[in-house]
Image: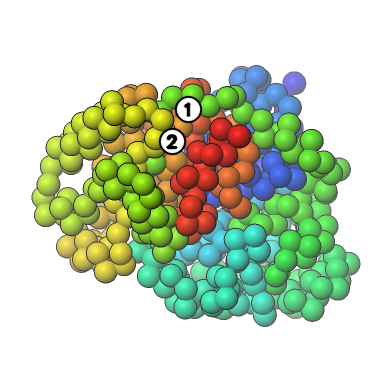
Amino acid sequence: MTKKFLLGCIADDFTGATDLANNLVRGGMRVVQTIGVPSEPSNANANAYAGVDAVVVALKSRTIPTSDAVAQSLSALRWLQSQGAQQIYFKYCSTFDSTDAGNIGPVTDALMDALGTHFTIACPAFPDNGRTIFKGYLFVGDELLHESGMRNHPLTPMLDSNLVRVLQAQTKRKVGLIDYKTVAAGSAAITARIAELQASGISMAIVDATSNAELVEAGKAWKGMPLVTAGSGIAIGLPQNFGIHATMADIAKSSELLAPQGLQAIVSGSCSVATNAQVAKFIAQGDGQSRAFHVDPLHLMAGADEAVVTAQALAWAKEQFAKSTSKPLLVYATSTPEQVKAVQAKLGVEKSGELIERTLSTIARGLVDLGVRQLVVAGGETSGACVQALGITQLRIGPQIAPGVPWTHTGELHLALKSGNFGSVDFFSEAFASLKA
């Protein structure tokens, strides 16, 4: 008999998928993440889905052409429907990464059409990582979205913090707001507000949220809603709707992984403020300078042979591992916003991103060939490229390293996929320390 999943999730990038899966695990759900849409039904690989409550299908669709993003998302929806998923969750970034062309609005439109539903919510709030929504405006920590580092994002610069306006530019459906006063009044008030919005012809609503308690209470109002769209924050309020109430023992059991082995490495392609600080901290610590290899985007832009750069990085890694097998290595292409703009001006946004991702993903595959079995990848696009280069098709979700970032496991490899903006300045050292614990 085919397993019927309680929750079927479609994530628009790989780090976002593990971020979502992490919060579902924290809520007591047993979760599997697939890389891309599975090519076979779940009952064809029963062991992989045994006891699973939710499946997160990870796509690399955040910044691809809109028509491709829609097609991939609908393909994921069809697979999840074929498995009997009771509710669909479209997951995007907690900073609502998109442009006026999409892809959040168009994908949401397509999923609503396919599901035959006339209303859904949009809520990228993730208070644990400082993403809160007030009066429809998204804050990153104490800053409005458009005043944060996201204004310099190389692919999706966010220049407006009003999410009603941002989403309305991407859809022909009318967008409204469920504001903080309604959310504070509880799930019954939210349900009543949804009815009011629908009566006025509104089909999508941004939802204010400033705390986990609000997300958990609001989650009750999403029970039975065919489609929810959000960052990973509202995931903490969904397991309760399926009768799952997790204890600490439940969470520990649902996130248990095999003991780690092998060498440790970090591959970083993110240019976010947070990742720049994490790279700088790693290099500044102890012998970190000698344990870090910089893949210079400007050097690649100038015509450096990718194969030569990759060979140099792996030769360096082999030499460093010969000196010590107990310390992690860092290979990074992390750059300042000014350096990123210089590369983009030379090659264009798409080609420059592909160049870095291709180089780093080839290096990541080489590091695993050298014996790396504990790998941290920083950056959503970089993570997607690395996972694809490694031929990974499925991940089991493990314990949380930091809000939004868990360890995962596949085969012999422990893998952490970190969104560029997530984690403390000590994230890299914390990641490996947590896996030993």
Locate residue 4, reporting x and y percent: 74, 32
Q: Which mark is residue 413?
A: 1
Relative to 1, residue 117 above or below: below
| Mark 1 neighbour density, 10 Å: few (under 14) some (14–19) many (20 or more) | many
User: Is 266 or 95 nearer to us in this picture?
Assistant: 266
**Residue in the foreground of this view, choosing between 268 and 264:** 264
- Position of residue 345 relative to residue 48, above or below, is below
In the figure, 41 relative to 247: above or below?
above
Vertical comparison of 131 with 33: above or below: below
User: Residue at the spot x=52%, y=42% of the render?
Assistant: 431
Name the residue located 48 percent from the left edge and 63 percent from the top edge. 97
In the displayed structure image, the side of residue 243 where residue 159 appears, left or right: left
Q: In the rendered image, which residue does mark 2 sit on?
A: 375
Residue 282 rendering spot, x and y as whole percentages: 39, 50
Report the colour scheme: rainbow
Residue at the location (43% across, 70% down)?
A: 149
Q: Quadrant of the C terminus?
A: top right
Marks 1/2 in contact by CB < 8 Å: the verdict is: yes
**Residue 381 in view, yes or no:** no
Quarter-of-image position of residue 101: bottom left
Residue 251 percent coordinates (x, y): 74, 38
The residue lying furthest to the right in this view is: 188
Quarter occupied by residue 325: top left
Helix, strand, or loop for circle 1? strand
Q: How far across and how far down the image is residue 299, in percent?
A: 15, 53
Q: Amino acid at mark 1?
A: Leu
